[in-house]
Amino acid sequence: MHDVTFLNVKTEKTHNRYKKAMQSARHWYGIIEVLIKQAEEDKKNAVNNVVQISQSSITDEIKKLAELRDIGILSDVEFQQQKEKLLG
């Protein structure tokens, strides 16, 4: 948490110093707002990437299990059990 001071003396709202301080505060508010939105979007994208990777790896594992079933190493029952474990 940081405090940012744009005006540290009592000033009338009609004074030029007050207007410049408000302009500066609005400018920085806009910058911070953009940074927050960007961080939220980055976080959302990171979560989506993890989900996609997880789904891809589950799909790959099911394919491997199917291959083991197809060549006779796993029975249909064992395949289904392992598949259910992966799908949660």
Image (cartoon, helix red, strand yellow):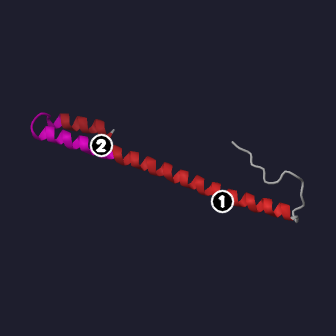
Magenta part of the chain: 55-77
Residue 41 picture location, percent across and down:
51, 54
Which quarter of the image is occupied by the N terminus? top right
Q: Picture quarter containing residue 20?
A: bottom right
Of residues 15 and 52, the one nearer the viewer is 15
Which quarter of the image is occupied by the C terminus? top left
Q: CA distance from mark 1 to mark 2?
A: 41 Å
Residue 37 picture location, percent across and down:
57, 55
- Mark 1 or 2, which is nearer the eye? 1
Label for residue 19?
Answer: none
Q: Is residue 15 left or right of residue 1?
A: right
Residue count near mark 1 (Cα–Cα under 10 Å), binned few <14, some 14–19, many ≥20: few
Q: Is residue 82 left or right of residue 14?
A: left
Main secondary structure type of the part rendered in magenta: helix
Residue tagged 2: 57
Residue 81 picture location, percent across and down:
24, 35
Q: Residue at x 30, y 46 (%)?
A: 56
Badge 2 amino acid: Ser
Q: Is residue 68 magenta?
A: yes
Above or below, comparing residue 1 to residue 40 in the picture: above
Residue tagged 1: 30
Disc tally is: 2
Q: Residue at x 40, y 45 (%)?
A: 50
Of residues 7 and 34, the one nearer the viewer is 7
Badge 1 amino acid: Gly
